[in-house]
Image (tube, rainbow, N blue to C red):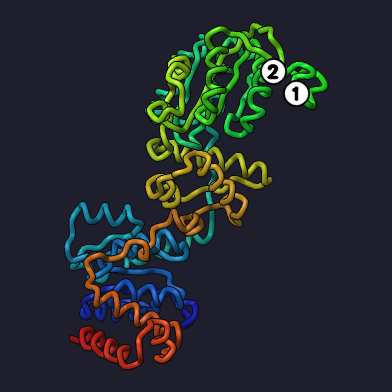
Amino acid sequence: MQTTTDRETVLVVDDVPDTIEVLRRNLTAANYRVFTAPGVAEALAIIETTPIDLVITDFKMPKISGLDLVRHLRENREDMEVMMITGYPSVAGAVQALKGGAEEYLAKPFTDDELFAAVRRALDKLHRRRMGGSIAPEPLPTRHGLIGQSEPMRKVMRTVSKVASSSATVLITGESGTGKELVARAIHYSSPRAAAPLVPVNCGGIPETLLESELFGYVKGAFTGATEARAGFFQTADGGTIFLDEISETSLGMQVKLLRVLQDHEVYMVGSARHRKIDVRVVASTNKSLPRLIEQGLFREDLYFRLNVVTIELPPLRDRGDDIVLLVNHFSRKYAQECGKAAPQLTDEALRALRDGYSWPGNVRELENTIHRLVVMSEGDRIDVPDLPAVMRFSVSRHPDLTRTLADVEADYIRNVLASVGGNRTRAAEILAVDRKTLREKMKKAESKRTA
């Protein structure tokens, strides 16, 4: 026979007292420990202080809905299961509940047998999850580091294949972190120039006073400290490809010099009056709108036309759909191997949160850093939604009920302040910047409205 401490614990959340009483009585008779709450706020308070195995929540409730509670628990607590009941059954409602993370969905009225069967299925799944893990997916073939099967990425790869065989100048555009250098590498290593050097240059990372000598080189005595001649990046890339990353950061004066290189295929080393012929393919990139910079007088239109022979626009990660899942699996294997551990598997719920619940302003670079951190910090062989950064998880507190009155919001805030100071009204009045009489009147008004 089970003891009180090892009985499975169920929390019933419903705003109808009769429903709560029926469920409490039936589940208690089936030897479950049962807690009840009339709303989401009360349920969260219980969950914070009491170990709960299963939450059974109504779908429609005032203030915060049961669906919001399901999402909150699924994305913040991995140690419990969630089941939804409703008196307003519909196919759309069931789909919405299951997508939100509910393990079971029951429409009222239901029999005791249907209730107990659904509760058992949900709890059995919880126990299985607590017991074991699963196998990581197989590695995905990549093309020079480019990973993606979405249509926007297929378009990028088709363009790479077309331009690789030529020596045409390519301009790669896209937000920061979308993988512009990877595309430049794919172009170079798919081209007849693959055996020659690929030289990446971060134009925004080199001081303007040094950029010319770094790009074009200098002769001995060209300036103080030039004790010997030194070749620049363009000479180093001769026969290959130079990748001018963030070309929008160059000055107008430097843009004139770059335009001459593109037109004449020759460079002048700093301090030299003689030009040197070069055979270099130029691939440039920017995360800014060059046409807009041209309107602002910050970028030369003639250089833009020289660079813009072929443009490859990289899509942001938020527009790449299931590519996020492919990238997650790739980075998970990569960093697990570096850490000398088996690659953890992300649950379906975690993958859904990464794919659909976050906009990824840092794009692929942000995703890679996130997966690296998750792999390093993971202690088991699975990663679930509660393991993700808080900003990627659904939270009731970040989705307030905007239908509440100002008086309701004020009353809840006063109650929270009082709870935080152990009911000390003097201290609460200080925090709220009101006198004790005003606080007492507000509390009385809130209580009378609550019991009305």
Task: State the image coordinates of residue 2 (x, y, percent, origin top left).
Answer: 47, 79
Callout 1 environment at 10 Å: few (<14), some (14 to 19), or many (20+)?
few
Label 1, secondary structure: give it: loop
Q: Amino acid at mark 2?
A: Val
Say which label, 2 or 1, has the lower sequence index: 1
Above or below residue 314? Residue 66 is below
Say above or below: 240 vs 425.
above
| Amino acid identity at mark 1 | Phe
Check disc 2: other Cα within 10 Å, few if <14, some if 14-19, many if 20+: many
Q: Is residue 203 left or right of residue 340?
A: left
Circle 2 sits on which residue?
270
Q: Is residue 292 left or right of residue 375?
A: left
* Numbered marks: total: 2
Looking at the image, is 262 positioned above or below residue 135?
Answer: above
Query: Is 33 on the left-hand or right-hand side of 386?
Result: left
Residue 341, numbered circle: none
| Quadrant of res 441 | bottom left
Q: Does residue 438 appear in this view?
A: yes
Q: Is residue 124 above or below residue 25?
A: above
Verify CB contact (< 8 Å) between mark 2 and mark 1.
yes
The front one of 376 and 260 is: 260
Res 223 label: 1
What residue is shown at x 29% (from left), y 77% (from top)? Answer: 410
* Label 2 SS: loop
Residue at coordinates 54% horizontally, 28% vertically from top-left? 250
